[in-house]
Every structure is written in C-alpha cells, then in structure tokens.
Image (spheres, helix red, strand yellow):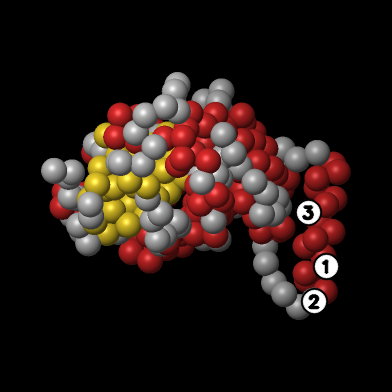
Amino acid sequence: MSEGQSPTIVRTSEDMLLQTLQGLAFGVQVRHIATTPLSCCSVSDSVEAVLAADEWKLYSQIPVREGDCTCGVLERSALRDVDGLVRQAMKPLDDSMLVAAGAPLTDFLQIAAGSTYRLVVDGGKVNGIITRSDLQKLPVRIVIFTFVTNLELLMADVIRSFAPAPAEWRQYLSEDRRERVKSKFDQLSRSDFYVDELTCTDFCDKRTILKGFLNDLSKDFTKDLKQIEKLRNSVFHAGEYAQNQQELAVLVDQYERARRWTNDLQRRLREHTGGVKTPIAAGTTFEATDDDVAQAERPA
C-alpha cells in the first residue's frame, strides 16, 4: 500500500467504527434484553408466601408494587428471616436500581458490573428487569463481537501501516504459524478470492506481530489481548459467561480493555500516518435521548 493511501486507512477505519457504534447505540438498547412484562408481588404479601410461590421460585429478585407503583425489590440473597410482610423485608427503590429502556447497550455494559440487576424504566414506568442471565442474549453478543472484531481489523491496519511488506511481519511468527497463513492464502487465491496475506492471519497472530515490532507496548498487552480473544470466542461460539458476579466483573473488564486498546492502536495509527485527529470512536459514549429514569415514579 502506498504512503498516500495510509491516511485513508485511518479515516475509513475510524469512520466505519463510529458509524457502526452509532447504529448500535440507536438500534441496540437496554429494552432489547430486558425481561418483560414485569411480574411483581405486593407490599402486603407475606415473605414466606412469595418465596414459596411457583411464579417466583426461579427468581432471585422479585419487584414489589404498592398499588400501581413499583416501590422496591425483594432480594432472596439479602433475606435473613422469612417471617413478616414484604414491606419490611424489601429493598426500597432508589436511582441505583434503575436504567432507562432507551439507554444504548454499548453504554450499559460499562456499568453492568455495578449491580446484579436493574429495573428498566420505559415511558415513566418500571416495566422490566435485567439480570445476569439477560446478558447472555443475542444483542449483548452482537455488541461485544462488534468491538472485538473491530479491534482485530484495527490491529491489521496498524501492521499494514508499520510493516507494509509481508516479509516484515512474517518474521515474528513461528514457522508453523507462517505455514498456516500461507496455506490459507494459497487456498483463497486458487478460489479466485483475492486478499492479502495479513488477512489470513488469526487474532493471535496479529497480537504476536504487534508485540514484535511495537516495543513500547505495555506489559499488559499480551495478557489483555488473550483475555479479549477468549471473550470473543465465548460470544462467537454461543458459550456462557457472566454466570456469577465475579464472571460479570470479568466480562465488563474485558469489554473495557477492548475499548482501551482500540483507543491506543487508533492513536498510534493516526500519529504514524499523519491522519486527521478525529475523536476516537471506541472512546465515544452515546447518551440516551429519553429521560425515563428522571421520570420514574416513586412510591407514595
């Protein structure tokens, strides 16, 4: 690739990610993973009866209503005594328990580890709930896979910019990995499908190559990228994750690391090519346009 084309790589890479994230922000929202309609018990119910009811046996958090207003949550894990009424045992509603239905899922994942559940506010009313199990749903997998796939494409852009000739980056791969790349490249070429050799490398190959010629990468680079790849594989192969609070924290951390390394590599690419210094897409947050949380009804 000629030097004159390099700025185009940067501009296109950033623009494509920004446009994709904008599409995800408006098209993939909290409401798309929420469990609805909301099944609630009453403040006047007995705790023992609620916990024993078939309707809620599988639920760890049971929303509570007083009249038409959601006023709290009965949390199984926090109960020390099943005697008495729900009113005395529930956790009263507060802002930390709420999330707007229209909030972008890209932003919600950044705060998901802060609690085991969130009540979803839509149109001024609480009408749904999000728990860890909801993070297994397809929209979450789409968001995570998009971020990690973009990171891999960005890694390839950086390699092409810093080491445009294949011989410059092949040297960092083992003989076995070089043969694997060559075999894939030859197979695609015979099928009359043209790609460059770098496109035939795997995520782990790109990680190894970058570590080879970017001497100032932090010591966490290899470890972080291995964890990000592990997350990508779980999402892509429909594996399970975030099955407990610790795993949820790991998920959010891996997601954040993917965002941070996207920022870092995008900066390096711009500086190396003299690209236009536009805002880094992966660091962009998209605020919800609705004010559902602010409008949430409070118990009388």
Amino acid type shown at disc 2: Ser
Q: Earlier in the sequence, mark 2 or mark 3?
A: 3
Q: Secondary structure at mark 3?
A: helix
How many numbered markers are drawn? 3
Say the numbered circle drawn on residue 191: 2
Mark 2 vs 1: CB contact within 8 A: yes
Name the residue type under label 3.
Val
Local SS, label 1: helix
Looking at the figure, which quarter contains the C terminus? top left
Location of residue 226 by image quarter: top right
Q: List the single residue furthest toward the bottom.
A: 192
Tell whether 171 sits left or right of 92. Answer: right
* The label number, if any, that marks residue 294 in the structure image: none
Q: Is residue 289 left or right of residue 27?
A: left
**Tag 2: Cα neighbours inside 10 Å, few (<14), some, or many (≥20)?**
few
Q: Amino acid at mark 1?
A: Gln
Q: Quadrant of the N terminus?
A: bottom right
CA–CA distance in space, label 3 to label 1: 10 Å
Query: Could you say whether the residue bearing mark 2 is in a helix, strand or loop?
Result: loop
Can residue 223 be seen here? The reply is yes
How many other residues sit within 10 Å of disc 3, few (<14), some (14-19) or many (≥20)? Answer: many
Along the line of sight, the residue nearer the viewer: 146 or 193: 146
Vertical arrangement, residue 92 with respect to residue 123, above or below? above
**Residue sitting at x 42%, y 43%:** 62
Residue corresponding to mark 1: 187
Q: Position of residue 87 (x, y in %)?
A: 29, 34
Within-10-Å neighbours for mark 1: few <14, some 14–19, many 20+: few
Label 2 and label 1: CA atoms lie apart by 6 Å
- Write down the residue under mark 3: 181
